[in-house]
Structure formats: structure tokens, C-alpha cells
Amino acid sequence: MADESLSDQVRELAGDGPWLVDLESENFASLHRVQRGLAQVQGSQLVQLVELEEMGKTLLLDGRVQLAESDEHIFHEMFVHPAMTWTQAERALVIGGGNGCLVRELLKWPCLKKILVIEPDEDYVRLCRGHAPEWAASLEDPRVELVHREFSSVLQLDETFDLILADVEETDSSFFSLEVLEHVEELVEFGGLFVAQTGGMRLGRSSLDPAHVRLVNLVREVFGEVRVGYEYVPSFNSMWTVTVASSCGFCGQAPELGQMWHAFENSVWADINFVLDEADIVTAYYDGITHMRLFSPPVDQGEIYDWPVRDEEPCHGCDKDKDDEGRAD
């Protein structure tokens, strides 16, 4: 069946067809039985909210599954909580994430005082607020500032953040460029982290997604050190990834978390759980044991990305000089 006809089926799912065809590549697609259509809006992208038999309420962007009620917590918890455990951030920048789920997870941390969200698509946010308040209600929190600008508008920012999250399509070259990421790196406070969703990979013949490999290496080129987290997300039908980046070698935090991003010791899971418990963080997926699996690569990273898997020794401090504002020179 031609790609064009598959696309037509997706766009007519609320009317003629009982099936959603989620076309992932020229050779691979997923089928989901549709219970009913809930809402849709056509702006810069086609945004649809549907009820699927297996996955519940599901958000589609241009016909592709963006998040599903049944398992969105996996993706958003792996995106937020490893980095928050490490940084204990007070100021966070979210690029994308107009559905509110990343912000929801961030707001679980009492240390956070401000979250700036950059989301260009007002129609997308409006649909989520109106039809998926369980996701988007977080955007109403007084600690959250939502601005509707293009992702590349980060080039105009000069304030710094302890944590920056980028939930941006991995093929979006307007954000994932050397110029933009170099500026983003300057916005990350010393000891802070940058985290980006970097797409999926199926462990088969089509596992080497060129966009994924290019993006991971681009982030590493800019920040110097990265760790890639891998987890299977059923609604995405693949092993999905987030890439965590540090420009100070994952240094600068409490010594008890020194093993968190390096060769794991048996106690690291307990140290992570202690931090989560102290902050009273309730999760459905992420904890210390999950962290160890999440950042234990299911593939040979040296072969795929052409760089070493991990540093041999953990870092318990940083020898880099800091300027008066606490940033590395």
C-alpha cells in the first residue's frame, strides 16, 4: 500500500476507518484500533486527540503517536527525574512540551522555583488544555511561564538555568544545529544538565536511525560528555532514547551521587532512591533500579556512535575554574 494512502487513512481515522495506521518508516507501521475521535486542530501541524482501544487517550501529531495515556509516564519520567535527582534544579527551561507532561513531572520537585516553557504551537496547547487537562493543568501553576515562540528563539535568551529539557523532533534542524546548541550550552549553569529526546531505535535491521546517531553526536560535540538512556515505550513501538549532556564532565554535585552517570556500584540505586524519598517524589516508573537499567546500553555504543561507552573512573569533583557567577570558564 502506498505511503500516500496510509497518510490518508490516518487523516480520516475519526470518520471512515476503525484503525490508526502509525507509519514509522517505508517498511514498518503499527495498527491501533480507534474507539473514537475526541478533537483535532490543523495549524502548523495536524493535532488529533483520539481514544484507542489498547492505549486510551492518545495524542497524534501529523498522524504519528506523540503520547498515550497508557505509558506516557515512562517517557516523561525518564526525561525528567534522572536529571532532577542530579541537579536539584531551581530554574528549568522546557523547549517544547506544550502538552504539559514534562512540566507535571518537574513540578513534583519542591526545589523548583521557576519553569520557562517555549512552545510555538498555540493550537496544540489550547487543544490539550481543553481536552486533556490531566496533562495540561500543570501549565497553570504559578511557577510556570509559557511563551509561544519558535524553538530557535532560545538564541535571544541570556538568563541561565540549572536544567534545560528539549522535547523537540529529532529532525528539527532549526533547533538541533551547532549554533543553537552552543548557545544553549552557555545557558546551562555550572553543574547543570541539558536533556534532549533523541528518537527511537528498534533492535533489528532498521535499528540505526541516522537522525538519532547524528543528534547524539551533535549534542556530545557541543557539551563534551553525554549519557544515553534507553527504554522501550510500547506506544512508540521501539526503544526510545533521551540524551543527558554535561559540559563539566558530570561533576559538581554531591559525592554520594558520583556513581550516578559512571560505572555503577551496587549502592547507586539506593542513593538515588534516598534522594527521591527525601524530596517526596512519587513515580510510577523511575527509581534507582530503573536508572541502572535505563543507562546500561542495550547496544555497543562504541560501534554505533564511534565513541567510548563510559569513563573508566567516576568523578567526585571538578577541577575547572569557575567565574564569579559559578560557571566554568
Image (cartoon, rainbow, N blue to C red):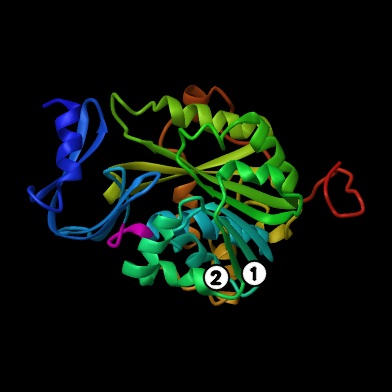
- Camera-nearest residue between 25 and 7: 7
Name the element at disc 1.
loop
Asked if residue 111 lies left or right of residue 216, the reply is right
Amino acid tagged 1: Leu
| Residue behind mark 2 | 107
The boundaries of the magenta stretch are 68-72
- Left or right placement of residue 294 versus residue 264 in this view: left
Which label is found at residue 112?
A: 1
Residue 307 — which label?
Answer: none
Report whether residue 206 is seen.
Answer: yes
* Residue at the outermost right position: 324
Q: Does residue 136 lie above or below 249 as drawn? A: below
Classified by dominant secondary structure, the portion drawn in magenta counts as: loop
- The residue depicted at 71 percent of the width and 49 percent of the height is 157
Residue at position x 40%, y 44% in the image: 44
CB contact under 8 Å: marks 2 and 1: yes
Q: Residue 209 in the image: state x and y as whole percent.
A: 39, 28
Task: Write the residue at 60% across / 41% down.
Answer: 152
